[in-house]
Amino acid sequence: MCQGSFATMLVALATVCLVPSPVTGQDVGQGASDAPRTEWGDSDLQGIWNNNNSTPLERPNEFAGKAILTPEELAAYTQRRQASREDRDSRDGRGTESDVRRAYNALWFPVPGTAISRTSLILDPQDGVIPPLTTDGQRRADARRGFRQVPPAGPEDRSLWERCITRGVPRTPGGYNNHFQFFQTPDHVVILIEMVHEPRIIPLDGSPHLSSSIPQWLGDPRGRWEGDTLVVETTNFSTKTNFRGSGQGLHLVERFTRVDADTLDYEFTVEDPTTWTHGWTAAWPLTSLQSEVGGLDQVEVPEMFEYACHEGNYGLVGQLGGARAEERQAPTQDTR
């Protein structure tokens, strides 16, 4: 979609944005009957939501066999996870390679949000760990690992996120630019992802998915309401995309439930029989950015930041330049 047409859609969608009304808190995962609603009666998901959490996707070994933390354990774990950000500024003699791997210092990363009581974002399987790879999935993982060890011939040999093309979906917490902005009309929902500024335009009109011969970077989403929960099913991923080893075979189902004025529960289930032995599910709450920073430093209405991925970016140039230097220094093979 061209910039002009997308901008026009955002302007049209923005005209239906409503101001959420105060609601009573409710247990995570259960929508609230008095949660904010649009003027046409759907649950109102609009606003900017912070996707930042201290809980890791997979359960750490230290919590093996333990699904839920006590309040005391949760407080201690959150404090430890939040303090780990400062290690990015450390240059303590562990060697050049270690320092380079931590090239993005603490300035780039927000303080991780409060952890949830579960020890992993993964709900299913119950061990909190991504299921094993299939034989084919492992073969592709090994091929990618070997490919990364070869000096890049050109930019196409580097990952999509290094080339500022896409970070894919679903988006798990981590890094920076962890915000989603939701827009709604009666027949569409748009989710604008802060990182890479990727828009997901989701029809709610019951239209069928695109032909399987038309792959998309972020797949082809279709949404529907199940009570107060927005369910989004996405197919038609590209062979070039990659979510933890899954690409073209990925089938993604997401569930968004407005719990109260400041909380949006998010859950996704992914399946790909060519990659994992079985599907898996993760879930965590998103928090209203307004509730976190509204009024801070005189900013009453927070906005998402610009994502200028290639501005001042010399990393890719350095990688390719280093590869060419290695090639020049390599011994010339005698082909006689």
Image (cartoon, grey):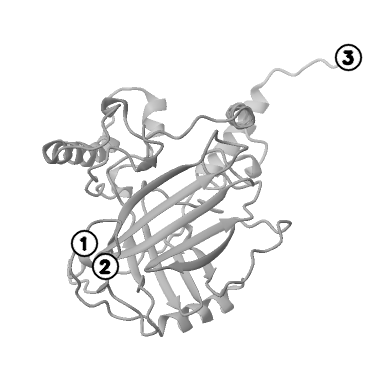
Q: Residue at x 26, y 31 (%)?
A: 66
Residue 195 x/y as whole percent = 44, 57
Q: Which residue is mark 2?
A: 32
> Residue 26 — which label?
1
Q: Earlier in the sequence, mark 3 or mark 1?
A: 1
Residue nearest the observer in this picture, 16 or 329: 16
**Distance in Å between CA atoms under marks 3 and 2:** 78 Å
Q: Are the residues at dot 3 and dot 2 in contact (C-beta closer than 8 Å)?
A: no
Amino acid on which the number 3 mark rests in the picture:
Arg
SS at mark 2 in the image: loop
> Residue 308 — which label?
none
Label 3 neighbourhood size at 10 Å, few (<14), some (14-19), many (20+)?
A: few
Residue nearest the observer in this picture, 44 or 308: 44
Above or below, comparing residue 185 to residue 324 in the picture: below
Q: Earlier in the sequence, mark 2 or mark 1?
A: 1
Nearer to us of marks 3 and 1 is 1
Q: Are the residues at dot 2 and dot 1 in contact (C-beta closer than 8 Å)?
A: yes
Rendering quarter of residue 229:
bottom left
